Image: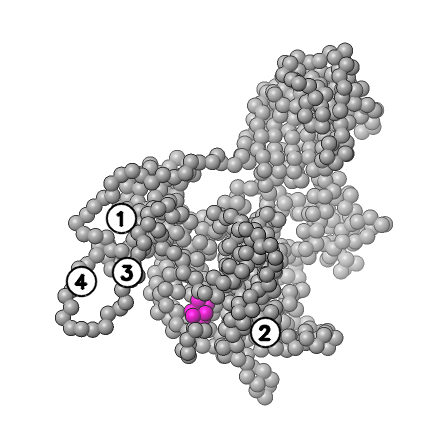
Amino acid sequence: MSSLNFPPIVHAAQKDTIQSAALAYAALGLSIIPLDGKRPALKSWTQYQRERADAQTIRAWTFGNIGIVCGAVSGNLVVLDLDGAAGYAAFAVTFPALAQTYTVASGGGVGRHVYFYADQLPPSVKAMNTPIGHLEVCGDGRQVVAPPSIHPITGKPYRVEQPLEILRVSNLDDLVAWVEAFKPRPETRAWQPPKISAPTGDAPLNRRVIDEISRVLIGQGFKPHGEWLHGRCLYPERHKHGDRNPSFGFNTASGYGHCYLCGTMLAKEVCARLNIDLMQLGGLVEKPEPPKITRRREPPADPPRDESSAPLLKLPDWLERYMAWAGATGNQTPLIFHQSAGLWLLATAIGRRLYGESPWGVRIYPNLYLMLVAGTTFYRKSTAYKLAESVARAAIPHMLMPTPGSPERFQEALAGRMPTNFDKLPKAQQERLTRGQPFAAQRGLLKDEVSGLFGAINKRDYMVGMKDLLMELYDCPDYFDKDTQTGLNVVENAAFSILGVTTPASLGSAISAGDWDNGLLVRFALLMPEPDYAERSASLVYQPAPADLIDDLRQLHERLPAPEMTEMGWSAPGALRLNVECWAECQRYGDELRRLCDPRREVELDERLKGVYGRMHVQAFKLAALFAALDWLKTDDDTPTVTVEHWNATQAICDGWRTSAHRLLEQLDKSGEATLERRQQDRMLTLIRVKGSAGCELRDLYRQMHITAKLGRHIAQELVRAGLVVQVNIDGAEGYAVIESIQHA
């Protein structure tokens, strides 16, 4: 469109002076006020929300910037104010027809003002601090900064981005509903325990039943409140909105539950709802002890119980010390991330040298796939990753696998084949790789932005087979082989562990619905920040990992069976069979979780989580094996023993992991950010593919997608990290080309 054919609103915005622009806006029937920065420069501008200033008044004002008053006074003008890099893109994808209107780019660099005339004036609404930025529908009582005003912080002008007529619509109900959907749920008052008498019976409740109920509820995120545990109702389907404001409490002294809507629930009903088998616990009520006829050795009595508090999670000393150090050093990182990083260190130190022989005929090794998922910057999730890496490099550097560049190179590393440049590496690196060769397939991998791995698997042809390989590695096969271009790779004695970090948006963009069904994603513990996350006090001076922490991890690694020299070179180390005292508890937990996956349940479990539930009892046993190994260091026993105490602690951890997976799904489903980013990536990839080996300039990409240069570069770099495109120079300009097209050029 020629500038001569621009609509009058655009000509007004492009005037040389602020005052001339203000007069031009007023001539179009818009109410104008002077601004100081972004705020009205008048003592009161209420008058101009009802009537427009005339030209004489406007000429008498001293303008810093121009404000256009929205609402009925300006002909039912409505402006959508989007302040955030992802805001406009999300709006344009959701409402493509509404995006075809006069639009102003904020001088702040990321904001947009989208103009409409509405026959039915909507209410003014806003949603602040959403995943895509601040959102506001400006109608009556609101004003917006108009071009050619200057942003008070950046010093850059507000400018016309889409020189179109202001779109006239009948109503903006859907747009208002979209903004309303981003509003956070209102704060609720603190839960108060019910003021009722506890139900009584003829016999006291079995203390083990109350303890088991308490343990399960704590694992589901319930919080102690004196002698009560507080959380969501066990029957959310009875609540109109699913018990958004948790209304249920369980009394750890008397053993009854109470919901403000559903009423009192007896322990028997609570056990049935939580799938707790009373027979496994000795029944609902205490049985009188038979008289002692002979003197015999009795099991030690349970320690006195503090009736005012819930059962505490007992962690091994080493893990407590690791979390204390990491939690103080990375004070802004959720403790669940530090805890899982410590568990990954233990799994990596052990490798494949401990196993439990399960009653169902499968050997379970303590390797782990862990994924730390949180929004960028705020939660400092990479700190957990880096602190764990520093401890691993100090204690067991040979147990870290270099990041693989392709499935073929990954298989070569698992088979113990040295890199092609081995002879050119420094001596220290050669020694590290040589020492790690017998552990080739049982090392640990640190993966920053692990969602890029899923993105590459799903979108790149040469990554075919990587998904199956990772799933097979998790189950620790004794042997598998594959013939590649470089020869036959034989992988033996695998027990691979992964610690990766990502954001919900990146993960949502990289995975598909199939990734929940085919088994790889659900093999990961999907860890989100704990619900009661709070950062700790910062250390004034950086403290490296304590020497005893590193020494104990090294001692654990070195006490287990070591590789042996044979005629064929170093052999892989052997493995100790664990003494296991908790198989009954493990099977019971697996059965409980299986029942929760029953499609006939009144409220069926989300299909995506069924794979998570199906492996949770195995996850808990892996952690129990790690705890047993730490306790074994303090003894002279030949083999570690996995006790019921170990199991109880690790089942509580895994129950927390299970609720973490629920939180991740809620965030992926609630926020459209991940879906939007995936669509943007797919669209950009299509635009780049069209250009073939010549590539496409970044400027052309973000212009065609109607997004900012900053957002365009971010999306392009995500495609680079996923291994789909490569950055190229096109006549001195930044550009991108699809890797396959360059390889075939």
Q: Secondary structure at mark 2?
A: loop
Real-space Cα separation, disc 1 to disc 4, in angstroms: 21 Å
Real-space Cα separation, disc 4 to disc 3, in angstroms: 18 Å
In terms of sequence position, does the residue under pointer 4 or pointer 2 come before the other? 4
Give yes or no for residue 209 being in the magenta stretch: no
Q: Amino acid at mark 1?
A: Ser
Q: Specify the segment rendered in magenta.
A: 625-631
For residue 470, above or below residue 539: below
* Residue 254, numbered label: 1
Q: Amino acid at mark 4?
A: Glu
For residue 643, above or below residue 15: below
Instruction: Answer whether residue 602 is visible to the viewer in this image.
Output: no
Real-space Cα separation, disc 3 to disc 1, in angstroms: 20 Å
In terms of sequence position, does the residue under pointer 1 or pointer 2 come before the other? 1
User: Nearer the observer, disc 4 or disc 3?
Assistant: 4
Residue labelled with disc 3: 280
Q: Are marks 3 and 1 in contact (CB under 8 Å)?
A: no
| Quarter of image, res 618 | bottom left
Real-space Cα separation, disc 1 to disc 2, in angstroms: 54 Å
